[in-house]
Image (tube, rainbow, N blue to C red):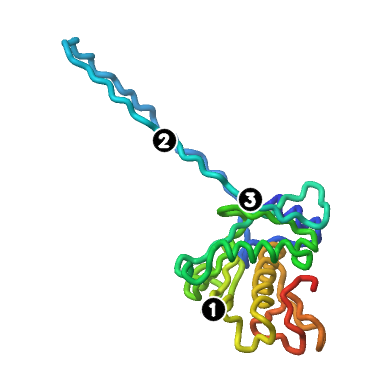
Amino acid sequence: MTRPIVRALAALGFVAASGCGSTSGEVAVPAATEPATVVTAAPAPAPTNTTSSTTTSTTTTTTTTTTTTTLPSTLDIDGAPLIEFSVKVDDALTDQLEQADLIAFVVETLSDERSWIGRGAGFRLVDEGGLFTIIVATPARTDQLCRPLQTNGRFSCARNGWVAINSDRWFGATDSWPADLETYRRYLVNHEVGHYILGAGHASCPGAGQPAPVMMQQTKGVGGCIANGWVDP
């Protein structure tokens, strides 16, 4: 899954990454071989007069439906696979944030042409797994998912198969955030997804009065820039 995505993003001038660590090669491990075991059946007992009864069992088959939502790229890239991702709310936060509401916000954000699809990335939402899972998690859980990166109960990260968003930031932004909470949440999603699919580093404010780059660490402040949640505002 990762290699075709790397090739597709490379065609866009992007470098895909799965966190800050290095990627090791795959090593095939041969299956262990065990000597065959021969089982000899015991002799059948002599027939006897018996009264037989028949029991009928009923088997119930449950069918699970998998739902996917495609967020296509705005650019036509031959053979480019869609980047599959999922969305989850930390179990400790389900009384504060509905899973359906989080999914709707993430899909709306990543479907917007001002987000990464405007640069040629294409996404597909799946029920579970994918290249990464976007999760709003408690500060402690975020720290755990982000290790060995030090998020210190404050920051979010993109690594280890997770785009982990610190719930304190999701619900309250920061004391220095100069704009509305919705803009900050757009920034969180676009910034961390940018780290994951592009391996993008951090940017700086290009000049006073200009929109802050989405890859700027706006959680730490926007300098003289204008707070911004989009890749291409």
Dot 1, crowdedness within 10 Å: few (<14), some or many (≥20)? some
Residue 221, located in which quarter of the rendered image?
bottom right
Label 2 vs 1, first from the N-terminus:
2
Residue 222 is left or right of residue 129, and the answer is right
Left or right of 10? Residue 39 is: left
For the residue labelled by badge 2, is the local secondary structure a helix, a strand or a loop?
loop
Q: Which SS class for mark 1?
A: helix
How many angstroms separate mark 2 from mark 3 (CA)? 26 Å
Judge the density around disc 3: few (<14), some (14-19), many (≥20) Cα neighbours within 10 Å.
Answer: some
Q: Which mark is residue 168?
A: 1
**In this rendering, position of residue 34 left or right of residue 197:** left
- Amino acid type at circle 2 is Thr
Q: Please give the residue where the numbered disc 3 appears in the rendered image.
A: 68
Residue under numbered circle 2: 60
Contact (CB < 8 A) between labels 2 and 3?
no
Q: Are marks 2 and 1 in contact (CB under 8 Å)?
A: no
Residue 1 vs 19, above or below: the answer is above
Q: Secondary structure at mark 3?
A: loop
- Crowdedness of circle 2 by 10 Å Cα count: few (<14), some, many (20+)? few
Q: Disc 2 vs disc 3: which is toward the camera? A: 2
Question: Residue 39, how many percent across, how many down?
Answer: 31, 23
Sequence-first disc among 1 and 3: 3
Residue 191 percent coordinates (x, y)? 68, 71
Q: Could you tell me which residue is drawn at 69 percent across and 69 percent down?
A: 190
Relative to 46, does residue 104 appear above or below in the rendering?
Answer: below
Q: Residue at x 69, y 64 (%)?
A: 108
- Identify whether 150 is placed above or below 76: below
The residue at the point 61 percent across, 53 percent down is: 126
The amino acid at mark 1 is Asp
Measure the alpha-carbon separation of dots 1 and 3. 29 Å
- Which amino acid, mark 3? Thr
In the figure, residue 166 lies in which quadrant?
Answer: bottom right
